[in-house]
Image (cartoon, rainbow, N blue to C red):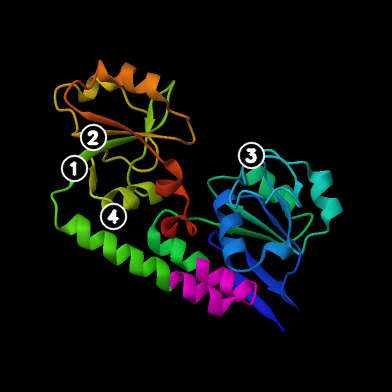
Amino acid sequence: MKIQITDAVGNKLSFNKVPSRIVSLVPSQTELLVDLGLADSIVGVTKFCIHPANIRKNKTVVGGTKQVNFEKIIALQPDVILCNKEENTAEMVAELQQIAPVHVSEVASISEAQLLFKQYGILFDKVFQADKLLAQINSKIEKLKTISDSEKPKSALYFIWKDPWMVAGNDTYINEMMQLLGYQNVIQENRYPQIVLDAFQTNPPECILLSSEPYPFQKKHVQQLTEFFKDSKIELIDGELFSWFGTRLIK
């Protein structure tokens, strides 16, 4: 069974059989693999792969998303290593390619997330399972659109980091999830720009969204930002819902 696939950054991968030993270095992709029925094929994960809750119990933890133990990965003899352009470094990917074929995803939109589902379906001979999950996700998206379309979008800032303050901008999966959930991002720049809080005091957004990840915002940060955004609603929100581009949307 010849499998040929091109990943998001142009790497052409070819396999003579379905890969059965997988190292996943992206938490949301690890969760997706499990939901596709591939839990037994996963041999290595990161310390941030927390869904499902017991995934690390019987797997080898090879490090984080930015730094891994290459010797551990070599010992696992993977058929394929799964990475993401944003979450893993280019240097890491280059070294991993000396060990096994590396599939790199790039997800800045819901449609790109859906494409990843289809690619994994082909790569791991799970087309039926991938299509079933996509149908569930599309149904959830339509329901959310119906709700958000019936209400006026709320202007919002989505914070991902502190010191320096960083927010989600355009060309991000987070931005599309904001729109889907009824928020209008006030940031015009792409990706994740740094901002100065004073710049928003004269025209503050209706909502300030403090994500649980990558920076773990807490109640004390709500109090701190209240000084700058006295008239805005400041919320601590689940960062996984907004930024995990696998099956988290239907959980």
Give the residue type that dot 2 points to: Cys
Residue type at mark 1?
Lys
Identify the residue at horizontal 76%, vertical 52% (top origin). Answer: 58
In percent of the image, x 83 and y 58: which residue is there? Answer: 77
Point out residue 38 in the picture as x, y percentages from the top left corner: 66, 66
Question: Which is more toward the observer, 38 or 175?
Answer: 38
Query: Label 4: few (<14), some or many (≥20) within 10 Å?
Result: many
Q: CA distance from mark 3 to mark 2?
A: 32 Å
Q: Nearer the viewer, mark 3 or mark 2?
A: 2
Q: Compare marks 4 and 2 and give the one earlier in the sequence.
A: 4
- The residue that mark 4 highlights is 180
Which quadrant holds residue 251?
Answer: bottom left
Q: Is residue 132 left or right of residue 90?
A: left
Ranked by sequence position, the earlier of labels 3 and 2 is 3
Which span is picked out in magenta? 117-134
Amino acid at dot 4 = Leu
Judged from the image, the secondary structure of the residue bearing numbered disc 3 is loop
How far apart are labels 4 and 2 at the CA level?
15 Å
Q: Does the residue at mark 2 contact the one at mark 1 (Cβ under 8 Å)?
A: yes
